[in-house]
Image: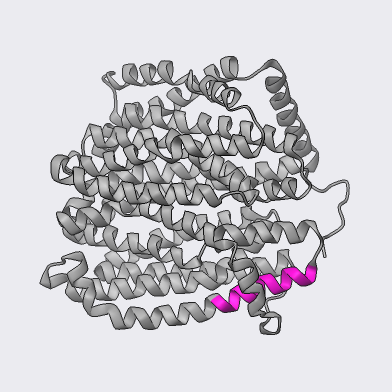
Amino acid sequence: MRPAVDARSPSRFEKIAHGVLSRYVTTAIGIVTSIILTPMLLFHLGREVYGLYAALGSIMAYLFVLEFGTGSAVPKYVAELWAKNDGEGLNRLVSSFFFAFLALSLSLILAALISLPLVPRVFHTSPRLTSTAEIVFFLTVVNFAVILPFSTMGGLLFGTHRIYVTYWLDGFFYVLNLASAYVALKLNYGLVGITFGTLGARILVILLLAWFAQTRCPTVSFKLSYFDWKVVKRFGTPSLYYFVIDLASLIILSTDQLIISSFIGVAAVTAYSIAFRLWRIPAGLITTLSNVLLPYISELDVYGNLPRLRDLYSKLTRYSLLVAMGMFACVAGFGEKLIGLWVGPQNFAGTAVLLCFGLMFPLHTIVGSSAQVLIGMAQHKKLAWVLFSEGILNVGLSILLLHRCGVLGVALGTVIARLVTSFWFAPWYACRILHQDFGEYVRDVGLTLIPFVPSFGFAVIVRQWSASPLLIIFGGSLATCATYLAIFYRLSLSRAERQGWWDRVTALATRGASAT
């Protein structure tokens, strides 16, 4: 089933580097398109319609719960079957989930039609937006129904170490979505036209995904004859805890805007959603490395290689924190100026809200790196319930603090809930499973955090300069990240690690030069 390996085949490091690079480029494309799209939508749609757009957009995140944890489970089991060279099992796995999700998608579209009259009441829309809200809600559900069955093909590419394909397709979708929104606004089709354009872009990208899955994995077939309900039950049952993790992540990251719209109104969502987006989009850069490594973690677990897993976990956390803390310094230093230049100072939610989202960079990174290792080893049961408890606490605190502190209370509820639950439990439990000393882990993490103070201080100084805002924001951010990287390289890496990085970079450069 697996192709023969020749001397020119890319090494594991090169595959990881390709996956990380493609994700970083795709995230950069997402950031650029978001920077262009957000003020364009605000200007043409207005605050109320944009708030409706943001609130209904959060529905998509909720719908992904209907994957029932297979977004993490399918790549893991594909990686295991791929490592065991089990072609028959792999065909049954992907075909069974594909057709099961296809049936679920059709049922979901029918349910969306039935529930349309409830949409205006749930989102407290004004009478003039009633029909718009119903149409956009239905198209959003159809968008997800298109994604759901074909996510199995993405899981196949992910589990066979070809995740870079899905990342490049994500970047293509961002560009298509921006172009379709521009055309819809130019033609005065409003929010409905924008949503139709998004659906069209999604269908095109899905067709490309299906083609790549067929050409990159020609020995794997998606056929109804391979469908086996026993396979769905066999692999679906362990996916329960993946589902709980996905549900918890959804509650933690996607309920804020719904809470604000329900208690205050959709207009109040706008400023909060912009600050949230300033954190959420770059957060993809941080989780990239752990996402790319999931198949390798599963393979190492299959072979029982705990020493390699411990080393991988330590490096994964440190290098992810390197990106996270650099982002934190930039957002804390230049976030207010960026939002003012981007969408206007009237859409700034406040410094305290911005700092809460900045603090989520390291908190999210530590939990995410630990969770990915536990998921790859199928040791995530206890973590799932801790994350679910965090989600419930998050909602309760957000509602309670909303009445006292406004939208700041919602952001504080998210941060406090994470600090008292998964922030300490996830790394402690991962160290326990890996038989790794937790104190040593804390020391390694502490070394990674050292460069934050001088880097943030540098950002504060640059922020005071009297120069072009554009130069201060982007030039200052690059200089802040370079400062962090230089201090990290000197103080947080051992001599052997520095030499190892030079050797890898030299090898990649040599390979690239010989290829050209």
Q: Quadrant of residue 266?
A: bottom left
Q: Which residue is painted at 69% across and 26% down in the image?
A: 501
Locate the N terminus by quadrant.
Answer: bottom right
Q: Between residues 358 and 132, which one lies in front from this camera angle?
A: 358
Image: magenta residue range: 87-100
Residue 343 in view in this figure: no
184 shown above or below 384: below
Left or right of residue 277: residue 313? right
167 shown above or below 483: below
Chief SS of the magenta region: helix
Left or right of residue 60: residue 511? right
> Residue 267, position in %: x, y?
16, 55
Q: Which residue is painted at 79% across and 68% down in the image?
A: 87
Q: Is residue 143 on the magenta stretch?
A: no
Q: Between residues 514 and 270, which one lies in front from this camera angle?
A: 270
> Residue 152, position in %: x, y?
60, 67
